[in-house]
Amino acid sequence: MKLEVLATNAAPAAIGPYSQAVKCGNMLFCSGQIPLDPATGEMVTGDITRQTERVMSNIAAVLSAAGIGFDDVIKTTIYLVDMADFAAVNQIYGNCFQNHKPARSTVAVKSLPRDALLEIEVLANV
């Protein structure tokens, strides 16, 4: 199958040797999003709520670039530096998935790039 790299200026540019998303057949593999402001490339300051809102906005932008939305997401993985943040993240995350609940894993990690508090990656149907 042919691979198609997708990118949008509405989400942060990749900060390493990877793509924002890669389409393969009818699947979209989205790289993890951390709370970077796409306009500045800088981390969003503030608590887990502000960071989660930015991450979900970044994911929405990447999905939109592929012509899809949250209802097309099949699986997500959430990486959290502090599992005590789970409830706050879950509240914002759940607001994005009101009509459809994708499969999900949540993993506690020691640290994330740029000292982000969370990172979320998604796999979607195109």
Image: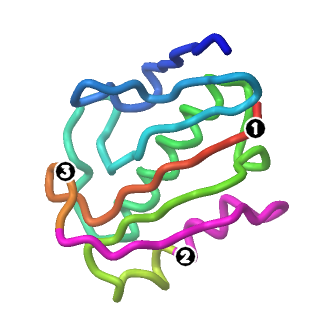
Q: Secondary structure at mark 1?
A: strand
Q: Which residue is mark 3?
A: 113
Q: Which residue is mark 1?
A: 125
Q: What residue is shown at x 61% (from left), y 67% (from top)?
A: 104
* Residue 20 badge: none
Up-down: is 82 above or below 45? below
Q: Which residues are magenta?
A: 90-110
Rendering quarter of residue 9? top left
* Image coordinates for residue 120, horizontal then vertical, percent: 45, 55
For badge 2, the amino acid type reads Asn
For badge 1, the amino acid type reads Asn
As drawn, the residue found furthest toward the right would be 99
Q: Quadrant of the N terminus?
A: top right
* Image coordinates for residue 106, horizontal then vertical, percent: 47, 72
Q: Quadrant of the C terminus?
A: top right
Q: What residue is shown at x 46% (from left), y 58% (from top)?
A: 53
Q: Which residue is mark 2?
A: 90
Q: Secondary structure at mark 3?
A: helix
Mark 3 nearby-residue class (10 Å; few <14, some 14–19, many ≥20)? few
Question: In the rendered structure, does residue 66 fall within the stretch colored magenta?
Answer: no
Rendering quarter of residue 101? bottom right
**Would you say 17 lies left or right of 87 here?**
left
For badge 3, the amino acid type reads Pro
* Image coordinates for residue 116, horizontal then vertical, percent: 23, 58
Separation of residues labelled 2 and 3 (CA atoms): 21 Å
